[in-house]
Image: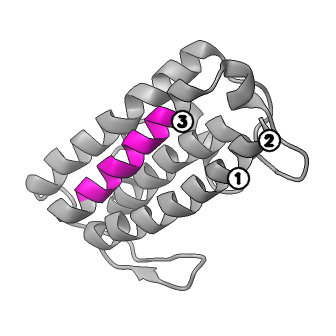
Amino acid sequence: MNTSLEVTRTSRKMLSQFLKAHTLAQLNTIPTGHKNNLIWNIAHVIVVQQMLVYKLSGIPMNISDTLVEKYKKGTKPEQDVTQAEVDEIEALLMKTIDQTEVDLNNNSFVNYQEYPTSTGFVLKNANDAMTFNNFHEGIHIGAILSIRKFV
């Protein structure tokens, strides 16, 4: 699992750099032809990781229900985020992965509700979820690389 966590940390460091390299206005811009913006993609990966690993394990997530409702699968930006929200999202990038590592090392994820992903891959445990999460984050980093050309 250490390799999977390190891949996630690398992804999260990249996402943090995108936050630092763009203004609040740029983070909130939805370019023509796109459904979301930079900040939505970054917050979305945090929410999905928590849902795939924690929620499907029946363990409380390390993020607020408000964040989940704004950034879960099927949502889109409804209003601009504030700098305070960006700061919260940035802090959660690493905090959530650090906590996940602690919980994995403590064997906290005993029960897991199998989940068939939209790609057809079935997650059977938290380790599967973390591996799939890296694939998911890669997709959204690709979206971010596309969006940033237009902001």
Q: CA distance from mark 3 to mark 2?
A: 14 Å
Residue at the spot 42% in from the left edge and 63% down from the top edge: 133
Across and down, in percent, residue 62 comes to 36, 37
Q: Amino acid at mark 3?
A: Phe
Sequence-wise, the earlier of marks 1 and 3 is 3
| Cβ atoms at labels 1 and 2 below 8 Å apart | yes
* Residue 81 position (above or below residue 102): above
Sequence-wise, the earlier of marks 3 and 2 is 3
Q: Which residue is mark 1?
A: 146
Residue at the spot 66% in from the left edge and 55% down from the top edge: 143
The front one of 107 and 58 is 107
The front one of 19 and 104 is 19
Give the quarter of the figure containing the C terminus: top right
**Does the magenta-highlighted stretch encompass residue 113?**
no
* Residue 1 position (above or below residue 59): below
Helix, strand or loop at label 1? It is helix
Q: Report the span colored magenta.
A: 5-17
Judge whether residue 64 can be spotted in this image.
no
Quarter-of-image position of residue 80? top right
In this view, the residue farthest toward the right is: 32
Q: Which residue is mark 2?
A: 150
Q: Which residue is mark 3?
A: 18
Q: Residues within 10 Å of mark 1 (few under 14, many from 20)?
A: some
* Residue 32 position (above or below residue 138): above
- Left or right of residue 79: residue 122: left
Residue at the spot 32% in from the left edge and 61% down from the top edge: 57
